[in-house]
Amino acid sequence: MYFVGELLTDPDVIKTRRQRNIQGGYVLSNVTETVGLDCFATCARGQCLASMSNCPKDCYNTVRETPALANARLTYKAFGNGEYRWGLVSTKAIAAHEEILWNYGPKYIYPIVD
C-alpha cells in the first residue's frame, strides 16, 4: 500500500502546507524538502496509508511498559518521468493487530484539532 496525495515540488509550498498540520493534515517530504506529498484530502477520505500509521513520538507501549519505537520507515522512489511512489517499509516483523509506527521527523508536533 502506498501514500496517495498531491505531488509538491516547490519548497515554499511544502513549508506552507506543513503548517496546515495543526488542522490534522499530512505532508510528507524528502530530507531536503524539494519534493513532497500532501495527503490531507486523501487521508480525510481514508484513501491514504497515512491514516493507517502513526508516529511513536510521545507514545508508550503499555504491554511492554516502554516508550513506543518505530517499526517502519518512509521510502520514496523517483521514476524519472516526474512520478514518485511513497510508502512504508517495515524495519522489523510487525505482528497482526500491532500498530505501524514510523518517525515523522524532528519537527513533528502532534496536531491538536479543536
Image (tube, rainbow, N blue to C red):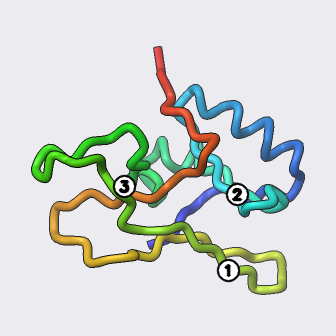
Judging from the image, what secondary structure is the residue with disc 1 in?
strand
Badge 1: few (under 14), some or many (20 or more) residues near its Cα, within 10 Å?
few
For label 2, the residue is 29
Labelled pair 1, 2 in contact (Cβ < 8 Å): no
Residue 78, x across and y down, in percent:
74, 80
Type of amino acid under label 3: Met
Q: Quadrant of the N terminus?
A: bottom left
Type of amino acid under label 1: Lys
64 vs 75, nearest the viewer? 64
Residue 34, x across and y down, in percent:
84, 60
User: Does 22 sit left or right of 66 as displayed?
Assistant: right
Residue visible at 51% across and 29% down in the picture: 111
Labelled pair 2, 3 in contact (Cβ < 8 Å): no
For label 3, the residue is 52
Q: Give the Cα separation between the discs numbered 3 and 1.
A: 20 Å
Residue 18 in the image: above or below residue 28: above
Judging from the image, what secondary structure is the residue with disc 2 in?
strand
Locate residue 15: give its quadrant.
top right
104 vs 69, nearest the viewer? 69
69 vs 73, nearest the viewer? 69
Residue 77: numbered disc: 1
Residue 108, x across and y down, in percent:
58, 40
Q: Give the Cα separation between the discs numbered 1 and 2.
A: 12 Å
Labelled pair 3, 1 in contact (Cβ < 8 Å): no
